[in-house]
Image: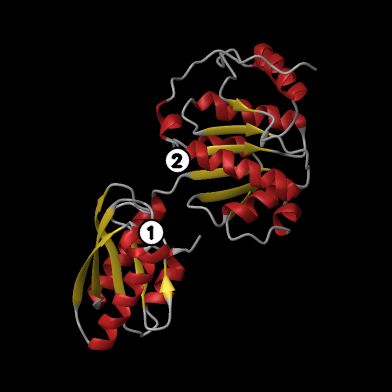
């Protein structure tokens, strides 16, 4: 995912820039009201949804630059008239950006970055690093946590890295609504971290690598050691259980990223009742 630093580089390149913003959305649209992208004579930053909608907006923005205009408005039906099938209608505001506009855009980007949900990858082994590789492109603040500096050093992803002697503390101090994926090098540590994440009661997602058998063992372990944890119904274990038999790290990571992003963005997940009973486990 592009960072605030990337946007700052784009906006301070010295080129004239047009802000392209969806100011009104009626019916179905590829993006929501307020979505913004930036257009120069030769480059783009961001997207308002692609297709003919975006093509026409970019063309209008570059005509605005070429003509020396300050602003214009577009009102576009997202139907057969422009070769798009969403069925809604959008109004688009195009504005040549002043220095103040650029500063304001950066401020908005910084605020939005601060509101991104946190995803904690607890374990920087093969699957943990594959997860970081994919989460770096998602609209989240990803934190890769491990006790081992050598494993962290193997990651090339543009995510936050933490060498943590006590990763339970990282869980304790995480923002509400965070997601936790536990896949350390030690089953005992997996159990400790997973129970810590579940005990918070406010996690958007808690996943632990392993099998149905490991889930059974974890449930028995919590019954003995975690009196405050009444249920592990919220636990995803196995993680990435999408039906694929492929166990390569990148494939597992892709399935887990899909689970996590669904949990973070789904309206159903946001309104699901808590405290459900533990579902039946697969036969061993």
Residue, disc 1 = 84
Q: Position of residue 19 (x, y in %)?
A: 29, 70
Q: Which residue is mark 2?
A: 265
Task: Name which residue lies at 76% across and 30% down.
Answer: 187
Position in image of residue 86 (x %, y %): 37, 52
Residue at 29% across / 76% down in the picture?
60
Q: Residue at x 71, y 32 (%)?
A: 189
Counting from the top left corner in percent of width and height, residue 159 is at 57, 56
Farthest residue toward the front?
80
Indicate which label's residue lies in the foreground, 2 or 1.
1
State the quadrant of the C terminus: top right
70 on left or right of 252: left
Point 34% across, 59% down: residue = 80
Q: Is residue 34 left or right of residue 262?
A: left
Q: Say left or right for 216 vs 256.
A: right
Counting from the top left corner in percent of width and height, residue 197 is at 56, 30
Distance of label 2 from label 1 (alpha carbons)? 25 Å
Quadrant assignment, res 175: top left
In the rendered view, would you say 54 is above or below 40?
Answer: above
Render colour scheme: secondary structure
Mark 2 residue element:
helix
Which one is earlier in the sequence, the residue at label 2 or at label 1? 1
């Amino acid at each position: 995912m592009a960072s605030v630093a990337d946007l700052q580089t784009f906006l301070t390149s010295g080129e004239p820039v047009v802000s392209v913003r969806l100011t009104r959305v009626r019916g179905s649209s590829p993006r929501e009201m307020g979505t913004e992208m930036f257009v120069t004579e030769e480059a783009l930053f961001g997207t308002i949804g692609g297709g003919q909608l975006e093509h026409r907006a970019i063309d209008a923005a570059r005509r605005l630059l070429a003509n020396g205009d300050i602003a214009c408005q577009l009102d576009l039906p997202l139907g057969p008239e422009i070769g798009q099938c969403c069925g809604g209608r959008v109004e688009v505001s195009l504005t040549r950006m002043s220095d103040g506009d650029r500063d304001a855009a950066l401020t908005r980007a910084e605020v939005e970055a601060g509101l991104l949900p946190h995803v904690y990858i607890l374990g920087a082994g093969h699957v943990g690093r594959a997860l970081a590789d994919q989460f770096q492109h998602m609209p989240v603040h990803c934190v890769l946590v491990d006790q081992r500096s050598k494993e962290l050093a193997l990651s090339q992803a543009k995510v936050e890295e933490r060498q943590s002697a006590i990763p339970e503390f990282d869980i304790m101090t995480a923002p509400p609504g965070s997601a936790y994926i536990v896949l350390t090098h030690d089953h005992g540590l997996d159990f400790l971290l997973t129970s810590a994440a579940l005990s918070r009661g406010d996690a958007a997602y808690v996943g632990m690598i392993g099998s149905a058998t490991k889930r059974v063992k974890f449930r028995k372990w919590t019954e003995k050691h975690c009196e405050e944890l009444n249920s592990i119904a919220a636990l995803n274990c196995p993680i990435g259980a999408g039906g694929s038999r492929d166990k390569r790290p990148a494939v597992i990571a892709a399935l887990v990223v899909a689970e996590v992003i669904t949990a973070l963005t789904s309206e159903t997940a946001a309104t699901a009742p808590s405290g459900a009973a533990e579902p039946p486990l697969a036969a061993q």
